[in-house]
Image: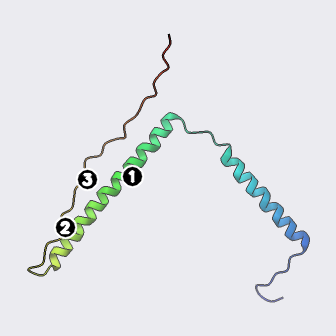
Amino acid sequence: MKFGTTKLSKGEVMKNIGIFAICALVCVSSYAALPPLSEEAQLAVNLAKAKAAYGDKVAAYQLCQAQNRVADHYRVAGTPSPAACIAPPPFEAPVVQAAEAPKVK
């Protein structure tokens, strides 16, 4: 038998297809069975996303400052200075919108 060549019988091929189909069905059904996030969990997810986005802004600002320091070090006299970096505003947590309770008459 040569390296890299494998011949499967018809039964083995059907067995592999069946196993793959069962695994795919189990994976799809497990995703469909997940319940929606609770309100508290959704708020926690939104807060984590906001913190990550703010961290990205801070990192971009710090990178800009570092690049400007390097550019100033190698800048030739008479050339314009690099663009100013804009500091991100302080972090603000996302606003929580409370669901209005139905009015009872």
Residue 83 got which mark? 2
Q: Label 3, label 2: how many angstroms apart (C-alpha)? A: 16 Å
**Is 81 left or right of 3, judged from the image as shown?**
left
Residue 23 position, x and y percent, is: 75, 57
Question: In the displayed image of the protein, which residue is found farthest to the top?
Answer: 105
Identify the image quadrant of residue 12.
bottom right
Residue 79 position, x and y percent, is: 12, 78
For disc 1, the marked residue is 52
Q: Label 3, label 1: how many angstroms apart (C-alpha)? A: 13 Å
- What amino acid is at disc 1? Ala
Mark closest to the chain's N terminus, 3 or 1: 1
- Judging from the image, what secondary structure is the residue with disc 1 in? helix
For disc 3, the marked residue is 88
Residue 46 position, x and y percent, is: 44, 43
Q: Which residue is depicted at the point 64% across and 43% down?
A: 34
Q: Which residue is depicted at the point 79% across and 56% down?
A: 22
Residue 62 position, x and y percent, is: 26, 62
Frontmost residue, 42 versus 97: 97
Identify the image quadrant of residue 67.
bottom left
**Is 70 left or right of 47, judged from the image as shown?**
left
- What amino acid is at disc 3? Pro
Count numbered badges in the picture.
Answer: 3
Q: How many neighbours does mark 3 have within 10 angstroms: few (below 14), some (14-19), or many (20 or more)? A: few
Q: How many neighbours does mark 2 have within 10 angstroms: few (below 14), some (14-19), or many (20 or more)? A: few
Q: Say above or below: 13 vs 88.
A: below
Frontmost residue, 9 versus 79: 79
